[in-house]
Amino acid sequence: MQAVAFEHIDKSFGAVAALRDVTFAVAAGESHAIVGENGAGKSTLLNILAGSLRPDRGQVTLGGTPVTLASPRDALARGIGLVHQEMLAFPNLSATANIFAGREITGRFGWLRESEMRARASDLLARLQLPISPDASVESLPVAHRQLLQVARALAFDCRLLALDEPTTSLTAAETDHLFRVLGDLMRAGVTIVYVSHRLPDVFRLCDRITVLRDGRLVETFARDAVSHDEIVRAMVGRSIPQRAPAPPPGAAGEPRLRVSGLTRRPCFEDVSLAIAPGEIVGLFGLVGSGRSELLETLVGVQSADRGSIAIDGRPVLARSPRASARAGVVLVPEDRQRQGLCFNLSLRHNLALPAAATRGTLLVRDAEIDDSEALVRDWRIAAPSTAITPDSLSGGNQQKIVLAKWLALGPRVLLLDEPTKGVDVAAKYDIHGIVLELAARGTAVLLVSSDLPEVLALADRVLVMREGRLQGELTAGADEESVMRLATAPLSVRGVRLPFDGAQGRQGDGGTAS
Amino acid sequence: MRTLWRVRELSTVAILVLEIAFFTWYLWPAGGRSHPFLNAANGLLVLKYSSIYGIAAVGAAIVIICGGIDLAPGAIIALSGVVAGGLFVDGHWGLASSAAAGLLAAMACGLLSAALIVLVGLPPFIATLGVMGIGRGVAFIITEGRYFDVSGALPPGWRLAGIPLDWTSPILMIGLALAFQILMTRFQWGRAVFAIGGNAVAARFSGVSVGLVQASVYLVSAALAGVSGIALTVVQGQGKADLAMGYELDIIASAVVGGASLSGGRGSVVGAVLGTLIFGVLRNALPQVPGATFYDRLIVGLVVIVIVVMDQLLQRRKGASS
């Protein structure tokens, strides 16, 4: 008996194909994992199941009947509950109001049957072993409890199928155990579970079958007992490495260009130490939520560190602000060019001139600005008809090159790259790799964060692997994908030293009842 | 959660009481003459003029809780007053049908705001700014600079359902405030308004008809401004196009002082009405303070800032300790 089946599902966002011809079925009463690297299409599939996205092609069937899931409300009415990766809660409402939001128990004219809902909420909270009052304001609850409230919500509507999207990314070990106990109870009660995660230990612990997605395609569905951790990893990453592996620059001895010692910012990362020589490219690999973007942001002073020190060419620097860091020679090309990288209301020229003007305090001089920006566009081979246009008419790849170029104009000593080729086409990716290699050849130290493992392995001289806010290990150039992925997903040898994400709140919430 | 609101409203009451106590003390008359501020007639005066703001502030609070903003109430007050007054005085319509026509004109404005926000997708600030101009403009076109002498056309000694004229709009304000307070806290519609203001995306995912509720909120706000406009026309005895100029900002300020958060999801209808009373007392008492004549706008501005900053500090401390 099938609980849900996906048949030839296609879904594209613009030119990016998120899902291509995905076909598989989830049996009733089983717990079924969907795993894959970032961008493999897991969340898209789940959103289709929850009715918030419509497939371009293909059919979803529930219990053998083809259905169209038009809206989240529709999916909920058909017994599909989704626990979102993001915290979709109403911070301003009580736990009870959150559980019943949109589907309140009502009398005439929508009169709220508060006492009935409160009683049901108490029952549900007790069933989930949640030590919170049904009247507790949700903003006072720790993240883990908010997540379990979403489970409570699904139960309140008698969901027979519960889909969870990366539910453990912000939970501590104890909270994860709690969630899994609850899910175990639900499975015994006959609820089907679809569990999306990149945490393989969690997946092996909970799920009967594991479906692997890669680049929007289904690789295979494995039975848990017939597959090893390593086989899953291989299925997740097994794709071809780009042909032209660029030659690594010569390693340099002597004073490192960038030295980071014991840098800590709770709860994002802890005790991070690393050194990068001039001309060296160091890859930093980790899955979403491992703390890598936060580390980069701290290095340029967007966020301030709790502890630790940063030195450039042996001289300590205080990363007080991106402006101060840029003056010291450390620049960050951020992950999200739409939001963090470019001002879309300004021309390319003004975008390119912004860091130089802001960090050096130069007044904008029109002629020099035009010359400089045109030189940058020429030097970095950006396909733009003019520097007077705004970035929105450029392709993603050329936008990304503008973001790079605006920082390169400063001649940085340390270049921090966060997902520099995310969402760009292959040609632009190749160009960007070329720019990075050229800079390194000129002596810039590069720290490259990327979820694109082949890219990291191709560019970097060394690869640091980060997981749950700590550096887990270092691999030299030529390491294979599997060993990196294993470090990034394997459980720590000592479970007890897991970094408590959102720790302070979490522990407090476990203890007593919030009022 | 419910206790939290009650506490928040209590603090608004406390500010109001302190304010009244201050002016009672400050304006205490020498030599046993009657108190210029603390007397029944003056109290009724404060209530009467505050209620014009108060009725509209009920709607403003609901819009703000829903995460929106409505700049149109001032203009809608004028428009509904002019429509009702014009039909009653020049058109010789009955009082009830004139009032109904004024209310319909107000609701037409609300529908326009709702359509611009929900269907066209304009930001509420822009949509209601436009409707504010349209409403005020239509009022001027209707009157062509005249005013409608409503009090002259009313039969002498006229009263609504036996209630003295001065009492009508305060009673209306209290009744509407209580009704909408119950609607907001005890009914599904109100819960949806809070949910959308708290997290509109989550509300959509939870199956709330976000567009419909948002539309209803602007319609309610406009209708309440219409009621306020009709009340103002009757109380002041005339319908004029330049009535209630700039009221929208006072009304929003009242809602905020009464606990509504402009980021949505928080606030109360009763709090907003209490907020209008805080400003009503200020507007009434300040002119009686010798030498304060030119300071009253300044003081009103300072009061808004001080109350909201205090509230945020309290919230932050509560957040830190919990």
Image (spheres, helix red, strand yellow):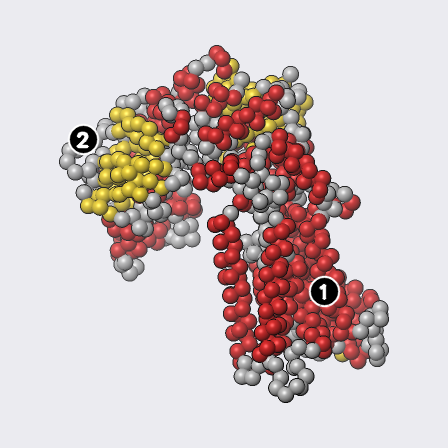
Q: Name the residue rendered at 56%, 56% in the picture.
A: B261
Pointer 1 residue? B173
Q: Which residue is drawn at 53% across and 29% down?
A: A179
- Amino acid at the residue labelled 1: Met
Q: Residue at x 31, y 46 (%)?
A: A300
The image quadrant of residue A479 is: top left
Give how far across and how far down residue B190 sits, in percent.
68, 50
Q: What residue is shown with label 2?
A: A250
- A131 up-or-down from A408: above or below: above
- Whether residue A257 can be seen here: yes
Is residue A76 or residue A246 the one in the foreground?
Answer: A76
The residue nearer to you, when weighing B223 against B87, is B223
Q: Is residue A227 left or right of residue B114?
A: left
Dot 1: what SS? helix
Question: Residue B118 location, x and y as percent?
Answer: 63, 50
Q: Residue furthest bottom?
A: B31
Give the label on residue A148, or none.
Answer: none
Residue at figure coordinates x 72%, y 39% from the top left: A116
Quarter placement of the C terminus of chain A:
top right
